[in-house]
Image (spheres, rainbow, N blue to C red):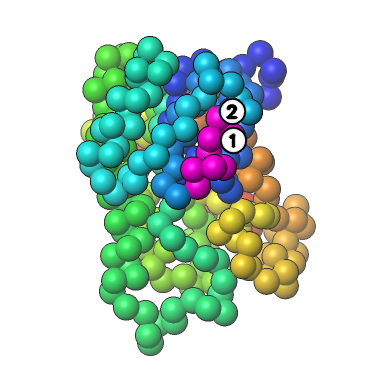
C-alpha cells in the first residue's frame, strides 16, 4: 500500500482495542484515516493504541455494540471529536469466544444460549452499528460497511457450531444490506478469514492445528492479522467503488469459491 494513504475519512473499527481489531486500526491509520476505536473491556490497550496514533487522528471509546444506546453515543463521540461523520465501518467486534477445538461444545451438548450469544454479538451488534452509521453516510453521499466473517461455514475444519452459524447469518445480512443500501451509495461487503496467527481469540489454539491448516494451504502458512487487514482496506478504498454484497475469503487459499 502507498504511504500516501487511500482513506482520509473517519473510520470506526469495532472491537478495535486488541487482536485483529488493533491490526485493522493500525492499517487504516497508516493509510491516512482518522480512526474511532471501539472497545468493550480492553480499555488500557485501546487507549494506548489511540495515543500511539495521535489524539487528532484516533479516539478510543467504550461501547458494547449489543447496546443500541451505547452505539449511538459512540457515533456521537466520533463526530464531535473528528468534526465529521464516520464514513467507513468495520464490524469486527466478537462475542466472547476461544478458538480451542478441544474445549468446544460438541453437537450433543451445545446449548441454544451459546448460539444466542454469538448471534447477539455478531448480528445484533453489526445491525446496531450499521443503523447508527446510516445518517452520517447519507449525509456524506455514501459510505462503506465491511463485516468480518469466517471461512468456517464453507470449510468447517473445526466445527464451532455457534460461532460459525453467527457468521453465516452475518453474510446474509451483508447481502441484504447491500441490496437495500446500494441506491444510497453505501457499499456493504464481508472479508472472511481462516485461523489467524495469532490473535487473542486464537491464542488457545494448539500449535498442531496451526501447522495442519498451514500445510493445507497453497501458501503453506497461516495468514497474519496484518495481511488480513490489507484486504479490508480494499473495501474502504476507491478501488472497490463498484463492489458490494461480496464475501472475500482471505485464508491463504484454503477455501476456494
Residue 150 screen position, x and y as percent: 49, 55
Q: Is residue 146 rendered magenta in the image?
A: no
Name the foreground residue: 20 vs 172: 20
Left or right, 200 with respect to 130, comes to right
- Give the residue displayed 66% in from the left and 13% down from the top: 4
- Give the residue displayed 37% in from the left and 14% down from the top: 84
- Whether 74 is drawn above or below 162: the answer is above
* Magenta region, main secondary structure: helix
Q: How crowded is mark 1: few (under 14 residues within 10 Å), some or many (20 or more)?
A: few
Magenta segment, which residues? 42-50
- Whether 241 is drawn above or below 173: the answer is above
Residue under pointer 1: 48
- Give the residue displayed 26% in from the left and 27% down from the top: 134
3D distance between C-alphas at marks 2 and 1: 5 Å
The secondary structure type at the circle numbered 1 is helix
The secondary structure type at the circle numbered 2 is helix
Left or right, 247 with respect to 158, comes to left
Q: Do the residues labelled 2 and 1 touch (CB within 8 Å)?
A: yes
Quadrant position of residue 6: top right
Quadrant position of residue 95: bottom left
Q: Is residue 45 rendered magenta in the image?
A: yes
Residue under pointer 2: 51
Residue 204 screen position, x and y as percent: 62, 67
Left or right, 253 with respect to 61, comes to right
Please say whether residue 255 is visible from this viewpoint. no
Amino acid at each position: 500500500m502507498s504511504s500516501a494513504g487511500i482513506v482520509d475519512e473517519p473510520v470506526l473499527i469495532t472491537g478495535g482495542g486488541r487482536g485483529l481489531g488493533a491490526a485493522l486500526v493500525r492499517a487504516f491509520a497508516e493509510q491516512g484515516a482518522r480512526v474511532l476505536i471501539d472497545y468493550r473491556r480492553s480499555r488500557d490497550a485501546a487507549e494506548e493504541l489511540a495515543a500511539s496514533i495521535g489524539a487528532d487522528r484516533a479516539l478510543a471509546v467504550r461501547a458494547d455494540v449489543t447496546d443500541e444506546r451505547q452505539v449511538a453515543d459512540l457515533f456521537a463521540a466520533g463526530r464531535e471529536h473528528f468534526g465529521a461523520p464516520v464514513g467507513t465501518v468495520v464490524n469486527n467486534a466478537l462475542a466472547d469466544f476461544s478458538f480451542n477445538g478441544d474445549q468446544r461444545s460438541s453437537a450433543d451438548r451445545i446449548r441454544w444460549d451459546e448460539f444466542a450469544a454469538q448471534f447477539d454479538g455478531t448480528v445484533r451488534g453489526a445491525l446496531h452499528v450499521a443503523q447508527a452509521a446510516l445518517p452520517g453516510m447519507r449525509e456524506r453521499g455514501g459510505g462503506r460497511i465491511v463485516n468480518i466473517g469466517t471461512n468456517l461455514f464453507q470449510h468447517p475444519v473445526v466445527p464451532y457450531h455457534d460461532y460459525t452459524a453467527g457468521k453465516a447469518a452475518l453474510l446474509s445480512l451483508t447481502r441484504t444490506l447491500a441490496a437495500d443500501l446500494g441506491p444510497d451509495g453505501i457499499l456493504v461487503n464481508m472479508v472472511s478469514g481462516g485461523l489467524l496467527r495469532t490473535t487473542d481469540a486464537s491464542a488457545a489454539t494448539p500449535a498442531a492445528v496451526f501447522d495442519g491448516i498451514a500445510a493445507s494451504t497453497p501458501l503453506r502458512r497461516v495468514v497474519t492479522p496484518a495481511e488480513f487487514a490489507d484486504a479490508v482496506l480494499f473495501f474502504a478504498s476507491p478501488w472497490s467503488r463498484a463492489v458490494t454484497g461480496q464475501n472475500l475469503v482471505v485464508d491463504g487459499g484454503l477455501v476456494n469459491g
